[in-house]
Image (cartoon, rainbow, N blue to C red):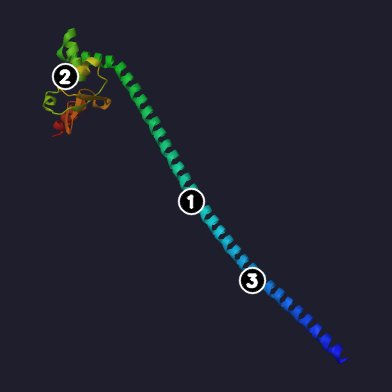
């Protein structure tokens, strides 16, 4: 019995020890695997967080870029709309001025007739054709003497009614300017207003009537 006891004890002891060592190794491996799995999970979570943060940042940048682009596009559309509106207004203003000048040009003959009739009544006799033309030219397009003293390269001439091509040529010749811009302003009634640089010579009928009224009131 004693012999069997020692034999079995030695055999079972080694078997138990081996089983314990094997279990210890398995447990250690399991713990190590668990530790590695935990590290891998933590790394994966960290990487996922980085990816999400980068995605959020990119999304914010995309929204910011989209907003900036939308604002730029809106500004461009508004600017284009303003330009088109301004173009329409300028075109309409130009058309209106052309129509006004056309109507005034049509009235020129009537105004000239009235002026001639008034002149005939004042002198008490009928004027010949050359004298009539001279009066009409003086009324519409006579360049004042003081205008010849103006110096410059370009100027602006305002008349009550549109001047004919011949009258414009005479005005340019009298002023001796390289460039002359002609404007129409019916409110001056007759005569010319000539501007060269910051100098102005006003021989309009409206100006003369104002001066006469002021003189009578003194």
Nearer the observer, 84 or 67 = 67
Residue depth check, mark 2 versus mark 1: number of the one nearer the observer: 1
SS at mark 2? Answer: helix
Pointer 2: residues within 10 angstroms few (<14), some, or many (20+)? few
Mark 3 sits on what residue?
35
The answer to which of marks 3 and 2 sits earlier in the sequence is 3
Q: Position of residue 175 (x, y in %)?
A: 15, 23
Q: Is residue 195 left or right of residue 45?
A: left
Does 119 appear above or below 80?
above
Q: Which mark is residue 7?
A: none
Mark 1 sits on what residue?
64
- The answer for how far apart the CA atoms under marks 3 and 1 are is 43 Å
Q: Position of residue 23 (x, y in %)?
A: 74, 76
Does 103 appear above or below 40?
above
The answer to which of marks 2 and 1 sits earlier in the sequence is 1
Residue located at (55% from left, 60% from top): 50
Nearer the observer, 201 or 91 = 91
Q: Is residue 53 left or right of residue 27?
A: left
Mark 2 sits on what residue?
173
Q: Position of residue 214 (x, y in %)?
A: 16, 32
Image quadrant for the N terminus? bottom right
Residue depth check, mark 3 versus mark 2: number of the one nearer the observer: 3
SS at mark 1? Answer: helix
Pointer 1: residues within 10 angstroms few (<14), some, or many (20+)? few
Nearer the observer, 28 or 109 = 28
Residue 165 in view, yes or no: yes
Q: Position of residue 149 (x, y in %)?
A: 11, 27
Does 11 appear above or below 83?
below
Q: Is residue 94 left or right of residue 115?
A: right
Toward the right, the furthest residue is 1
Toward the front, the furthest residue is 3
Image quadrant for the C terminus? top left
């Amino acid at each position: 019995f004693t012999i069997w006891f020692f034999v079995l004890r030695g055999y079972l002891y080694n078997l138990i020890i081996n089983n314990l060592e094997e279990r210890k190794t398995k447990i250690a491996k399991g713990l190590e695997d668990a530790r590695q799995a935990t590290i891998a999970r933590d790394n994966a979570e960290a990487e996922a967080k980085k990816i999400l943060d980068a995605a959020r940042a990119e999304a914010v940048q995309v929204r910011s870029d989209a907003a900036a682009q939308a604002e730029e596009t809106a500004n461009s559309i508004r600017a284009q709309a303003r330009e088109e509106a301004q173009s329409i207004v300028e075109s309409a203003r130009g058309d209106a001025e052309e129509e006004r000048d056309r109507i005034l040009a049509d009235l020129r003959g009537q105004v000239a007739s009235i002026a001639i009739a008034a002149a005939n009544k004042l002198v008490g006799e009928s004027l010949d054709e050359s004298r009539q033309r001279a009066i009409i030219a003086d009324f519409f397009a006579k360049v004042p003497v003081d205008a010849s003293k103006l110096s410059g390269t370009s100027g602006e001439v305002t008349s009550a009614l549109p001047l004919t091509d011949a009258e414009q040529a005479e005005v340019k010749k009298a002023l001796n300017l390289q460039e002359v811009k002609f404007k129409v302003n019916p409110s001056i009634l007759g005569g010319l207003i000539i501007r060269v640089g910051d100098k102005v010579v006003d021989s309009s009928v409206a100006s003369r009537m104002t001066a006469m009224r002021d003189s009578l009131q003194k």
